[in-house]
Amino acid sequence: MAAGILTIDETTTGGRTPGPDLDFGSDEVTVRDIIEMRVRTEVDAFNQERSETFRGLVTPSESETRFNQPKPKARRTIDPTLQVDAAVTAFLRGTLIVLLPDKQAESLDETVRLATGDSVSFLRLIPLVGG
């Protein structure tokens, strides 16, 4: 059983920020499972904390942000399914790279064996302005 998987957000400039720890019921999971649990964990935490700023793997769309703007006595929530879809799309487009303990993930359906204490990094590629 894989428990306590560490996630790390990396930038192309070498920055590293810890993400949420993930606990899976099995030591074999797919890359899709990793992405989905990562996103759902951070969205659930945000929705429970009632924070004003969401700092997650993917940013809510403009329409979702506008729709969920805080209103008097209203609570802003983020839809985890939309966020998972955005993260999966980013992976498929190559703008989100998942770095497993021993290699780069190649497909969403790739099966990965993880052990307690392993780290999985998420590298978001952001296009340069004018490039």
Image (spheres, rainbow, N blue to C red):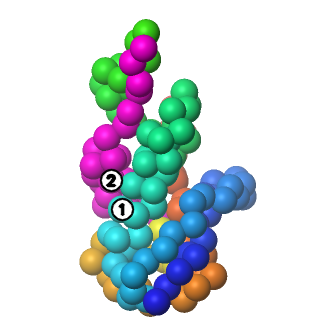
Name the residue type under label 1. Glu
Query: Exactly how many numbered labels are in the figure?
Result: 2
53 inside magenta stretch: no
Q: Compare marks 1 and 2 and give the one earlier in the sequence.
A: 1
Circle on res. 84: 2
Looking at the picture, how far across and down is residue 107, in whole percent? 32, 75
Looking at the rendered structure, the secondary structure element under dot 2 is helix
Q: Say whether residue 99 is visible.
A: no
Does the CB distance between marks 1 and 2 fall below 8 Å?
Answer: yes
81 inside magenta stretch: yes
Residue occupying the far top of the picture: 72
Q: Which residue, given by chain and number where applicable, does mark 1 sit on? A: 36
Q: Say whether residue 33 is visible.
A: yes
Residue sitting at 50 percent across and 48 percent down?
Answer: 45
Residue sitting at 47 percent across and 41 percent down?
Answer: 48
Question: For mark 2, does the 10 Å Cα neighbourhood hold few (<14), some (14 to 19), or many (20 or more) residues?
Answer: many
Q: Nearer the viewer, residue 129 or 65?
A: 65
Is residue 96 shown left or right of residue 84?
right
Looking at the picture, how far across and down is residue 32, in whole percent? 33, 69
Residue sitting at 60 percent across and 58 percent down?
Answer: 19
Magenta-drawn segment: 73-97
Examine the rendered structure and indicate whether residue 51 appears above or below residue 101.
above
Mark 1–mark 2 Cα distance, whole angstroms, equals: 6 Å
Q: Nearer the viewer, residue 100 or 49?
A: 49
